Image (cartoon, rainbow, N blue to C red):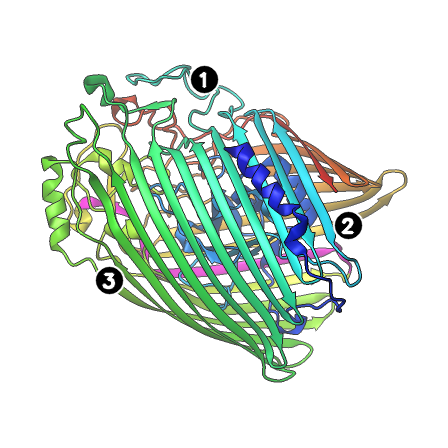
Amino acid sequence: MQVKRISICLALAFAPSAFAAEPVVMPQVDVVAKKVQPLPSLNDTGLGQDSLVRLRTNTSDTAQMLDNQPGVNVYRAGGVSSLPVIHGMADDRVRVKVDGMDLISACANHMNPALSYIDPANVASVKVMAGITPVSVGGDSIGGTILVDSNGAEFAQAGQGTLLKGQAGAFYRSNNNAQGINLSTTIATEQLSMRYIGSTVQAKNYKAASAFKAAGAVVGSITGNVVAGDEVGSSSYQSENHALAFGLRNDNHLVELKLGLQNIPYQAFPNQRMDMTGNDSTQINLRYAGQFDWGALEARAYNEHTKHSMQFLGDKRFWYGALFNVAGMPMDTDGKNTGFLIKGDVVLSERDILRVGAEYQTYRMSDWWNPVANSPMMSPLVFQNINNGQRDRTDIFGEWEARWSQEWTSQLGLRLDSVKMNTGNVQGYGPMYAAAATVFNALPHQRTDNNIDLTALARYTPDESKTFEFGFAQKTRSPNLYERFAWSNTNTMVMNMNNWYGDGNGYVGNLNLKPEVASTLSGSASWHDNQENGFEVKVSPYYTHVQNYIDAVTCASVGKVCAARLDGFLNLSLANQSARLYGADVFARVPMGNASGYGNFTATGVLNYVNGKNLTSGDNLYNIMPLNVKLAVEQRMGNWTNTLEAKLVDSKTRVQAVRKEMRTAGYGLLNVYSSYEWKQMRFDVGVENLLNKSYADPLGGAYVGQGATMGTGVLYGTAVPGMGRSINAGVTVKF
């Protein structure tokens, strides 16, 4: 099937009849003028092309490409499904837009987050807004915004005729035997463009630097695979992505159509009790951009459909199977996501720009678990976890940007959104679930949240070497479908399967949850020279207070009676509380000059610190990354680029008691990277964790990656370890 898809896409990409019209000579046109671009925030960061190419060799997880950007860390999950964290807030608290689409995770364990739908080989630009996010790009989120885009339509230059170009790449990583290839081709005239992008990757379980458990199965479990003591069970994966992009340009107008297809046959999760046994997604994304005398106009319509399945792969087994010959526990999800956007950048004067727009998103999701033969617990009915869940969001926004002088610029924004949620009645597998289903079905399910976002930002540039920025934002996020509508509280098995945190605990939702409202004060100060990649030091402190913060609580505290358990983990619910987070991001780049015969040297450093506290309970917030620093020295000499990188992470001692979160020790990692470019080829090689340091990942969650998924077979109290030494190599060829 994979070869057939690639063959069809290649045939389409190179078909001469695709552009049979006579070429018309016309000047090159920039669709959006520079003067109407949104005001960037000082603590917005991005990845350069050189960094993107190097990172593709070392990871198949797009979220991992953001790790250790200022203000950003990553919740580790499956091999292509990690979750980015901005200032201690992750998952649905961060708005992630992929090619302008607001994608939603269709899974009770959030195994298919937004960034899992774009392969690193297809990433052309990344922008992280970790500070005051403008309302024109951020809504229904409180932690920040991440914008990830593939390449836009590319056209032939005037008089060039037909443009034909392409790029192919391959990589290998030794630790988990990861192998992958990617290909992109473009054919274009001055008005029409077509591009194909394809990639595939497959990897085995990765290995820690040393044994962190006994070899084989966890005591009391039933497992089909023998897992070595240093092997991280349930960390293998395979992923395949294809996309076709079309572009049509006429004068100052551009229309783009992108079609995407994803197939993940399997992806195992070391911090979840289930594994992904299928994720098929189709995407249709249509965009118009035009420039007029009054400014710029953009419109977008998209549709994404995901079919997602979970089961146990070879490293895991359902503990109940020992008694009743049960094969497993199938779980299926179907999610449909449709969105529309229209926005305009209106140039009111030389000083003022007004941005106005509207968005609408409709989301439908059903999550059901088919009955299992020979199981008195999982039969005879279909378990309806979410039955026709609905989440519709309507937004309007306005943003005024004014350049008062050469020194002062301001931005004010207002966004109003309405989030309507509902779900149908549910049922369990059988009589033992009837009481909880009856209670849930008797309650009204429909909820409507009317939310307000506000931003106020000012920038002061006294001279060319200094820039200062400060601002305030109020951001609001409504709960997701699982937070409100996960209903079963009487069975540990079911509660375990509703866990989007990776902490090993079980969860039941809360219909009474209110939207989270975050108030943030943020500032940035930058000292720099005027040279590209020159000297720069940037410090960005922040303080956030969250009203109605959704956090884990005991079931009794919200009037629920949850099943008891004896395996060391907990069954919990959710409630609105108050929280505060504060911290700072520091970035520094210092050119070290040219050493005769050894090229140019540049030193860089990134420091991230965040402190999170639940003000209602006095507990710490969950999964807060401890103080961490990344230092690097880069050498450029001719076609060579060499980098020595050190990552230092403090011990994690501020843990959340209510979840029985695990502490982790501090550690330091050393990485070495080298690349060589020659004509149309680029070679990359790197050694990550050069010294083969053993460490537990502070954001990796609880290790439940092998053996029985529940009961005494679970290896309680072990954190997911980081990867041991890996030698990575990749080659990229342009043609």
Q: Give the residues drawn in magenta, as a range.
A: 531-555
For numbered disc 3, what is the local secondary structure? Answer: strand
- Give the Cα separation between the discs numbered 2 and 3: 55 Å
Q: Position of residue 157 (x, y in %)?
A: 76, 60
The residue nearer to you, when weighing 452 against 173, is 173
Viewer-nearest of labels 3 and 1? 3
**Residue at x-position 63% and y-position 72%:** 460
**Residue at x-position 48% and y-position 42%:** 262
Mark 1: amino acid: Gly
Viewer-nearest of labels 1 and 2? 1
Query: Which one is earlier in the sequence, the residue at label 3 or at label 1?
Result: 1
- Give the Cα separation between the discs numbered 1 and 2: 44 Å
Mark 3: amino acid: Arg
For numbered disc 1, what is the local secondary structure? Answer: loop
Q: Which residue is mark 1?
A: 229
- In terms of secondary structure, what is the magenta stretch mainly? strand
**Residue at x-position 64% and y-position 65%:** 249
Mark 2: amino acid: Pro
In the displayed structure, would residue 386 be above or below residue 295?
Answer: above
Query: Which one is earlier in the sequence, the residue at label 1 or at label 2?
Result: 1
**Residue at x-position 48% and y-position 25%:** 205
The residue nearer to you, when weighing 638 against 564, is 638
Q: Which residue is mark 2?
A: 591
Q: Which residue is mark 3?
A: 447
The residue nearer to you, when weighing 684 against 26, is 26
From the viewer's perspective, tell me whether residue 657 is left or right of residue 113: left
Q: Position of residue 464 (x, y in %)?
A: 74, 68
Q: Are marks 1 and 2 in contact (CB under 8 Å)?
A: no
Residue lying farthest to the bottom in this orientation: 349
Q: Is residue 43 visible?
A: yes
Among the 4 quarters of the image, the one containing residue 53: top right
